[in-house]
Amino acid sequence: MIAQLKNVKKEYQGLQVLDGISFVLQPGEIVCLLGPSGSGKTTLLNIMAGLLPADDGECWITDKVSYVFQEDRLLPWKTLLENILFVKAEREVETARAILAKLGLIDFCNYYPAELSGGMKQRAAIARAFYAGGDLFLMDEPFQSLDVELRLRLIKELISLWEVKRNTILFVTHNLEEAILLGHRILVLSDGPAKIKKEFKVEMAPADRVPEDFKELKQEMERCLAVVD
């Protein structure tokens, strides 16, 4: 077991944001947390990352966690390669370069963030997480600002990286296709206060999936999201 949440609750300025969230993350699985904007997905990730306390319930997480935020959070005064290397005390240049090569960034090692496109910067943020390592990756809508074509390409690249080490990934999204293409399990959140409405399982390996094969699942998930509790 990599993480376990039991009846986690969170209130913010008198508003109940999370209302009894419970789930378990197992080694090597990708779990997508799907819900509408403002449903508390980021709040939940911040609790799991230790950035916020839960008001009630239990949250046990493995010690080794990497967090990929919605923004790339690259340091503007460091080159792309330096942005990757600085997250570990021992510089493993060849490891970093291998990860950058996997993401198509090897030719941009000496570029600064201002010289990179939005898609490149998001790839760099993912590269940094895989270089830092960890049993659990928390990913907070890292592709939300990208166009459809680039998003699909980065999903494939993320799966390719995951297949090497099989880290556990909790991937937050409000995009149904992202969830279907990535998740072994998809946890659907209600609108706030957030509860887990339903869990969907996808048996096919992520690398083998195409959106057209999952029209019925997408429709069922759309219906689930549309139902008001």
Image (cartoon, rainbow, N blue to C red):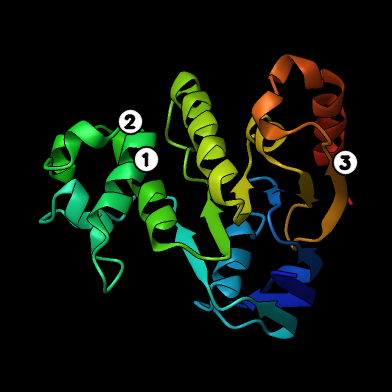
Mark 1 and mark 3 lie on one chain; the one further toward the N terminus is 1
Assess whether mark 2 and mark 3 are in contact (beta carbons under 8 angstroms).
Answer: no
Residue 76: give x, y in percent of width and height: 15, 53
Extreme-top residue of the structure: 212
Task: Tell me the number on the disc at residue 227.
Answer: 3
Assess whether mark 2 and mark 1 are in contact (beta carbons under 8 angstroms).
Answer: yes
Amino acid type at circle 3 is: Val
- Residue at the image point whose x is 24% and y is 35% from the top: 106
Amino acid type at circle 1 is: Arg
Task: Tell me the number on the disc at residue 172.
Answer: none
- Residue at the image point whose x is 82% and y is 36% from the top: 202
Residue 220: give x, y in percent of width and height: 88, 30
Extreme-front residue of the structure: 94
- Residue at the image point whose x is 54% and y is 45% from the top: 164
Front: mark 1 or 2: 2
What kind of element bears circle 3? loop
How far apart are the two marked residues, 3 and 2, measured between alpha carbons? 41 Å
Judge by depth and name the residue closer to the eye, 72 or 52.
72
Q: Is residue 82 left or right of residue 65?
A: left
Q: Which residue is mark 1?
A: 123
Quick one: label 1, few (<14), some, or many (20+) residues within 10 Å?
many
Amino acid type at circle 2 is: Gly
User: In terms of image quadrants, where is residue 108?
Assistant: top left
User: In terms of image quadrants, where is residue 1?
Assistant: bottom right
Residue 88: give x, y in percent of width and height: 30, 69
Q: Which residue is mark 2?
A: 104
